[in-house]
Image (tube, rainbow, N blue to C red):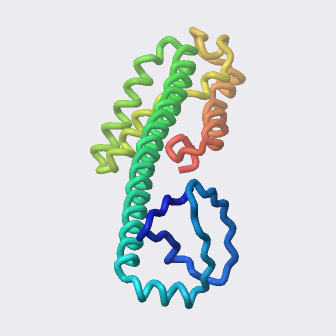
Amino acid sequence: MLDRLSPGRAFGELAVLNCSLRLASVIAVESSEVLEIGKADLEEVLDAHPADVRRMLGSLARSLTLAKEELATHASRLEHEVRRRTADLHESQLEVVRRLGRAAESRDYGTGSHITRMSRIAHLLARAAGSDPDEGEQLLQAAPLHDVGKIGIPDAVLLKPGPLDPDEWEQMRSTPRSERSCSRAAARPWFSSDR
C-alpha cells in the first residue's frame, strides 16, 4: 500500500509526470474513490491547493532524505567491507610470499639468516634512497623471494659440501631463470622481475 489517505490528505507523483503509462495494484481498505485526471487538470488542482502541494513536497523531501541517509549508511558499510577484504587479501598475499621464502630457505639450511638480512637491507636501502614508504615495505616483504629459484635445484647440488663440477654450476646458474619465470606471471609489480 502506498499510503492511507484520510479526508484532506493527498498523495501523488510530482517528479515524473509525463505521458508514460503506469501500472499499479491498489487494495482499498476503506471505502474509497478513484479519480483519473490528466497533467493539465493536475496542475490546476495543485495551483488551487498550495498547502497540499507543500505537504506533498514535505513528504517527498522526508522520503528522499531518509533514502539518502540509507544510501550513505549502506555505502559506509560497503567501504568498510572493501577495506576489510582488501586487508585480508593483502595478508594472504604476504603469507604466500613468506611461505615461498621459507620453502626456498628450507632447501639450504645456511641461508635462513641470509634471507632475513636481505629483506632488512633491501628495506633500509629503499628508505635511505628516499623511496616511498610503501615501496620500502614491499621490498621488505618481497625480498625473501630472491632465492626462490633454489626450489628447483636438486639437493645433491644445492647441499653439496665440496666444489661444484661444471654441470652442477650450470644448474645453480639456472636459479635466476627459474625466479624470473615465477615472477613474470605475478600480477603485483613488486613480485615482477621485469621492473
State the image coordinates of residue 182 (x, y, percent, origin top left).
Answer: 64, 36
Indicate the quadrant where residue 9 lies: bottom left
Residue found at the far front of this picture? 31
The residue located at (59%, 69%) in the rendering is 33
Residue found at the far top of this picture? 161
State the image coordinates of residue 26 (x, y, percent, origin top left).
Answer: 63, 60
In the picture, measured across the screen, residue 123 lies left or right of residue 31, that is left
State the image coordinates of residue 21 (x, y, percent, origin top left).
Answer: 70, 76
Q: Quadrant of the N terminus?
A: bottom right
Q: Is residue 96 above or below residue 69?
A: above
State the image coordinates of residue 80 (x, y, percent, origin top left).
Answer: 41, 43
Q: Is residue 2 above or below residue 184?
A: below
The residue located at (29%, 50%) in the rendering is 130
The residue located at (61%, 71%) in the rendering is 34
Residue found at the far right of this picture? 167
Nearer the observer, 194 or 163 = 194
Nearer the observer, 57 or 158 = 57
The residue located at (39%, 76%) in the rendering is 52
Indicate the quadrant where residue 96 lies: top right
Nearer the observer, 136 or 15 = 15
